[in-house]
DNA sequence: CTGAAAGCGCTAACAT
DNA sequence: ATGTTAGCGCTTTCAG
């Protein structure tokens, strides 16, 4: 960085005080309109650039919201970001995106970094390996509003925005059972994480309600990437399942590919059900049945909740922490229609 | 934000000066090891959190690199980000990601915002609608290093990291011709943007070298989203093409879906060739032939180039701007194998 | 409507 | 090895 034009330079040139320049640039109505215009013109002419750092330091607020994500590379997350941005842009807040690549360590570092940068609030989806939210206590202590979404700690006392993962898991499984499936394999990720555990519990409950015995050999936990999904699928095929319920559309697509390689027909021989409603779901053959995850809405709600908290904080009030459940929807396409295939074609 | 612990509070408690505390926290070796340890311990005990804002203002550098993207939702961009992060983390630089959603206006606002936040450097992939780089002149004037990658302005005098889009377009087209295709349709995006124009020129050149007359009715420009791709495909089908060369894997997948709905076999009736090597390419049926875009490498090279510039700047030197071309690769899968289908099965 | 002075929290020159 | 002093660039009392 080299010598920058400051408000003092503008003030000198115009023979007025820096205070007036500052106010003029911020369109403070107390300043004469003509003076204001002159200030803006001179600023532009001299190539002045506002120094956000200095301003933020002085104002003790950054008008910036930190976003802590577990990953950025998914349709769902992109939708959430779009929703968050939509709400925060309206309120003139910037966002600072960080992602942990599912590493709890990196998440802790990011949380600390954002605190040091003095964000005014935080929106968080936890990394897979984060088992608690102790690293957010500095935020709680300072009363910096935090909203968790999707990947949360159920026991934690904080504001959460989620979908009803239990019901989604239940509905997906019940649908497969209604299609005549009796041996439903389940591929999912770390059951310590709420979203996966709840879906799993829904899966088990649907089996039970339909008098199908749960078998743990039919469940595989992996990281849902390509290699591990292939391995899990092959492993589970030894159990001769007639359906797969997989908590990721990408992994479900990989699974279908594996099934095709084994010359198994989907859904005739084996039905497949995904999760998330990624764009790829209706580009593959057969098109994938899945659960729609309303990312944009989730982002909007999380951001709105955060803004509420920030505004209340200014009046020294506090919003009661609550859990908000966003509606989600089951989407039936071909991959799961073992019985009703023709009906839907 | 409420009352925070500062280095003065620590200094008071320990009966030493704030300077010593500052140096101690930064592990300055000039400070006695014992004092240093005491400072760290007290800081932790008092719940001290470093104020990056104040530090940056004082140091006149933020150790932060701004990233200006046209979009975040693609495998390619995620790979680039991973590459950039890998290099910058090693140098202890933070990154500040912004995206323009292809809007030139938003890009200008983002560029200004990042300048105001005093980033030490910038890595940029231009929005579709950005026709010049005038909005970066404040950076150039201040000698803040900027590196452009992928989506660039060819004429602009600056550092660029690209792939050889012309050759990629040429090779894809030549491959389709070698497979016996004679009427190759081309779906792409705004030809004002280098990446699309170069591929288009490569396409034309390959036709010419193979004595196939270029027909502009076989080319459709659209935004490559689902709706417009469907429309473009249907429009082009009226020309009875025997191949589609589409500059996006997602759009190519959509195209294949449309072809299937028309009961056209891919590649037997119509061959399809994509671009980017997205993960979805080998999940669809048939698997998609494409061009591999080495995102991670591109991100690494861009970040390394930027670091070089930043380091040279400290010695008041300047790196000569150059264009770096990253190698890319043609990937043949089933979707384009009109002739050699069996050979590869 | 405008200005003077102080200070946000930190670090770097310049002492000692 | 530690301290004194000043200042990064802005905004905000308080005063006029």
Image (spheres, coloured by chain):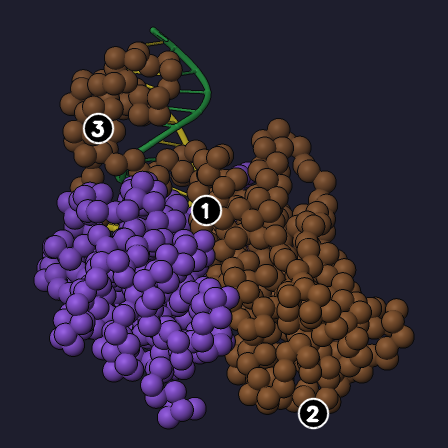
Chain colours: A purple, B brown, C green, D yellow
Q: Residue at x 62, y 28 (%)?
A: B315
Is label 1 or label 2 in front? 2
Helix, strand or loop at label 1? It is strand
Instruction: Give the mark nearest the N terminus, 3 or 1.
Output: 3
x, y percent for residue A266: 42, 76
Instruction: Give the mark nearest the N terminus, 1 or 2.
Output: 1
Q: Residue at x 62, y 41 (%)?
A: B305
Task: Point out which mark residue B65 bears.
Answer: none
Q: Is residue B149 visible?
A: yes
Is label 3 or label 1 in front? 1
- In the image, residue D6 above or below residue A175: above
**Disc 2: which chain?**
B
Quadrant of res A312? bottom left
Residue beneath label 2, please? Answer: B238
Residue beneath label 3, please? Answer: B43
Tell me whether marks 3 and 1 sit on the same chain: yes
| Left or right: residue D11 compared with residue B65 | left
Helix, strand or loop at label 3? It is helix
Tell me whether marks 2 and 3 sit on the same chain: yes
Foreground of the two, B260 or B13: B260
x, y percent for residue A88: 33, 65
């Amino acid at each position: 960085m080299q010598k920058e034009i400051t408000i003092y330079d503008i003030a000198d040139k115009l023979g007025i005080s820096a205070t007036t320049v500052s106010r003029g640039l911020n369109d403070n109505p107390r300043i004469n309109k003509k003076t204001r215009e002159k200030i803006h013109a001179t600023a532009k002419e001299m190539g002045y650039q506002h120094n956000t750092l200095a301003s933020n330091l002085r104002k003790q607020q950054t008008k910036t919201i930190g976003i802590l994500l577990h990953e950025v590379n998914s349709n769902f997350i992109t939708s959430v970001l779009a929703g968050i941005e939509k709400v925060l842009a309206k309120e003139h807040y910037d966002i600072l995106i960080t992602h942990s690549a599912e590493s709890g360590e990196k998440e802790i570092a990011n949380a600390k970094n954002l605190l040091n940068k003095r964000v005014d609030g935080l929106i968080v989806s936890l990394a897979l390996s984060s088992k608690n939210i102790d690293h957010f206590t500095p935020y709680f202590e300072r009363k910096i509003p935090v909203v968790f979404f999707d990947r949360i700690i159920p026991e934690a006392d904080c504001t959460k925005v989620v979908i009803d993962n239990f019901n989604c898991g239940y509905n997906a499984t019940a649908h497969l059972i209604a299609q005549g499936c009796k041996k439903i394999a389940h591929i999912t990720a770390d059951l310590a994480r709420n979203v996966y555990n709840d879906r799993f519990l829904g899966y088990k409950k649907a089996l039970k309600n339909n008098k199908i015995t749960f078998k743990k050999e039919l469940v595989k936990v992996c990281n849902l990437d390509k290699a591990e999904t292939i391995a899990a699928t092959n492993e589970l095929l030894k159990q001769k399942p007639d359906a797969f319920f997989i908590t990721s559309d990408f992994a479900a697509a990989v699974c279908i590919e594996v099934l095709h390689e084994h010359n198994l027909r989907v859904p005739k021989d084996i039905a497949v059900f995904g999760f998330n409603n990624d764009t790829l779901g209706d580009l593959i053959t057969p098109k994938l049945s899945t659960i729609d995850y309303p990312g944009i809405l989730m982002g909007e709600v999380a951001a709105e909740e955060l803004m509420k908290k920030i505004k209340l904080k200014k009046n020294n009030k506090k919003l009661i922490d609550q859990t908000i459940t966003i509606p989600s929807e089951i989407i039936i396409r071909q991959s799961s229609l073992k019985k009703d295939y023709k009906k839907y074609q």
